[in-house]
Amino acid sequence: MTTRLCLDSRMSTGLLFGLRRTGVARAVERPGVRGALTATLRRVHLGGDGFAVRVDAIRGAPGRADGDAVPTERRVTYAVTGRGQSRATGLVAAHATRHILTGAARPGVRHLDEVDELLGLPESLGSEGLRLRRFRHDAIGPIPPAW
């Protein structure tokens, strides 16, 4: 699994990545620096409230380049977009909590994507302003739908 963070502007994303790579971001671990940075970020608001989450799921093998092997790879790509990422996170947490508290959850530890009863959750949150899109795939990669 790979997790990536992207901000509203390429410049902001590049700056954040550059600070991390140079080690300057480690200065945030110092209490004085952390407090000053937190106070500054409370006053400065960059970007908007829109967000996007993209998921790529791949199973199997892609076959050899010479074409001799039959590809068995299956892949699917989805994206969820909306406004208010914190609210969307809270909605997902509330649905998962309700699932557990009603006794519908099987015993054990699971990731949300492993709980079959919650697989339809992205579609059901459409009324909350979230939009689910499925990408088609070709030989090069995912083809985005008309946004």
Image (spheres, helix red, strand yellow):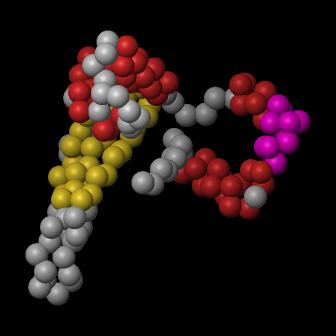
In the image, 110 versus 23, the foreground residue is: 110
Locate the N terminus by quadrant: bottom left
Q: Quadrant of residue 108?
A: top left
**Which quarter of the figure has residue 36?**
top right
Is 45 a magenta residue? no
In magenta stretch: residue 31: yes
Location of residue 25 in the rendering, given as x and y in whole percent from the top left corner:
74, 50
Q: Is residue 27 above or below residue 131?
A: below
Where residue 44 sits: x, y (%)? 69, 29
Q: Which quadrant holds the C terminus? A: top left
Question: Camera-side residue: 15 or 132?
Answer: 132
Residue 71 shows in the view:
yes
Foreground residue among 50 and 56: 56
- The secondary structure that dominates the magenta segment is helix
Q: In the picture shown, does residue 120 fall above or below 27?
A: above
Which residue extends farthest top? 102
Q: Provide the residue span drawn in magenta.
A: 27-36
**Whole-percent x and y of residue 139?**
19, 68
Residue 30, above or below 115: below
Residue 137, image x, y percentages: 19, 58
Q: Is residue 60 left or right of residue 50?
A: left
Q: Residue at x 30, y 27 (%)?
A: 106
Picture residue at 72% right of the left edge, 25% below the top? 43
Is residue 94 depicted above or below 35 in this figure?
Answer: above
Task: Identify the residue at horizontal 49%, vertical 50% (top origin).
Answer: 4
Q: What is the quadrant of residue 131 in the picture? A: top left
Which residue occupies the extreme front position in the image?
107
Left/right of residue 120 with respect to residue 13 in the rendered view: left
